[in-house]
Amino acid sequence: MSVELHIQKKLRAGDREFDLDIAFASDSERIVLYGPSGSGKSLTLKAMAGLMTPDAGYIRLDDRMLFDAQQQINVRVQERNVAYLFQDYALFPHLTVAQNIAFGLARGCFNLRKPASHPAVQKWITAFELQAIAGSHPAQISGGQRQRVALARALVSEPDILLLDEPFSALDLSLRERMRHELAELQQRLGVHMLLITHDPADVDALGDEVFEIRDGRISAQRSL
Ligand SMILES: Nc1ncnc2c1ncn2[C@@H]1O[C@H](COP(=O)(O)OP(=O)(O)OP(=O)(O)O)[C@@H](O)[C@H]1O
């Protein structure tokens, strides 16, 4: 699968201005956008997910145009077939692990009372070894388990690409290392396409086949590992 985009967006907050102008293309399975805080990583990821609308430009996944300002194309979030993993995982506290995963399915496709009865939910509960905690709530499980639940919820809809926003920042150092390798292994096993944003060089080493460095709203360097 290939990703190609060129997006521009001007943001203002009081007398502060930020000028985003990001262009890159890649057909790598593991893309990393790497750069310091405030460089424009989250804005780029949000634009891909459809959570932020650029002023100009386009975003293409394979032959699907998700956004094109000139052609007035702006595919709805739910129809982009991309999954977004938030930094804090954004699990629903009042839903169990199985219900949280089932929520990733298209709306109306699952039974909240019996979430694990859906084969896709069952598949991901097993893949992430979450059987023992399927009936627990997010507050009752560990940070690593929370991340696995969030990944399962993101993958249950079989997205074309998984967008990851600093996926290890909520974890302590030793767990971070473990989950990084777990994610790298998972990616290889499933062949799922990932685009990850980070300011941590260790994420780049573990998860970047193609790395785009981002500074002040621009791609400043590109390398393949
Ligand atoms: N809604 C907004 N209005 C004005 N400025 C914004 C808005 N959202 C983001 N910005 C600015 O755009 C810049 C890029 O933000 P972005 O969230 O993409 O950074 P980032 O690289 O993801 O940083 P971090 O690693 O800290 O999350 C920042 O300077 C930020 O203050």
Image (cartoon, helix red, strand yellow):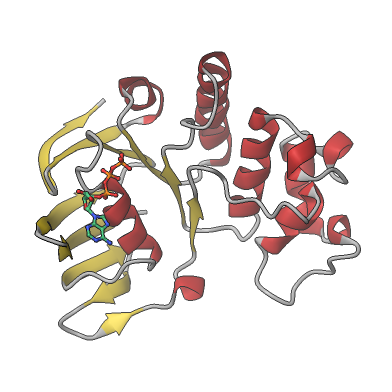
Would residue 217 appear left or right of 92 to someone viewing this image?
A: left
Q: Residue furthest front?
A: 14
Task: Report the front residue among 3 and 130.
Answer: 130
Q: Would residue 2 be visible to someone looking at this image?
A: no
Would residue 181 appear left or right of 99 to someone viewing this image?
A: left
Residue pictured at 15% horizontal, 63% vertical: 12
Position of residue 121 relative to residue 33, above or below, is below
Q: What percent of the width, then of the height, locates residue 110?
A: 79, 69
Position of residue 54 relative to residue 164, above or below, is below
Q: Residue furthest top?
A: 174
Number of marks in the image?
Answer: 0
Q: What percent of the width, then of the height, locates residue 103?
A: 70, 62
Residue pictured at 59% horizontal, 53% vertical: 154
Residue pictured at 53% horizontal, 58% vertical: 159
Would residue 52 appear left or right of 220 to someone viewing this image?
A: right
The quarter of the displayed image where residue 38 is located: top left
Residue pictured at 70% horizontal, 33% vertical: 145
Task: Report the front residue among 77 and 123.
Answer: 77
Quadrant of image for the C terminus: top left
The quarter of the displayed image where residue 99 is located: bottom right
Quadrant of image for the N terminus: bottom left
Q: What percent of the width, then of the height, locates residue 140?
A: 79, 36
Position of residue 116 relative to residue 211, above or below, is below
Position of residue 198 relative to residue 53, above or below, is above
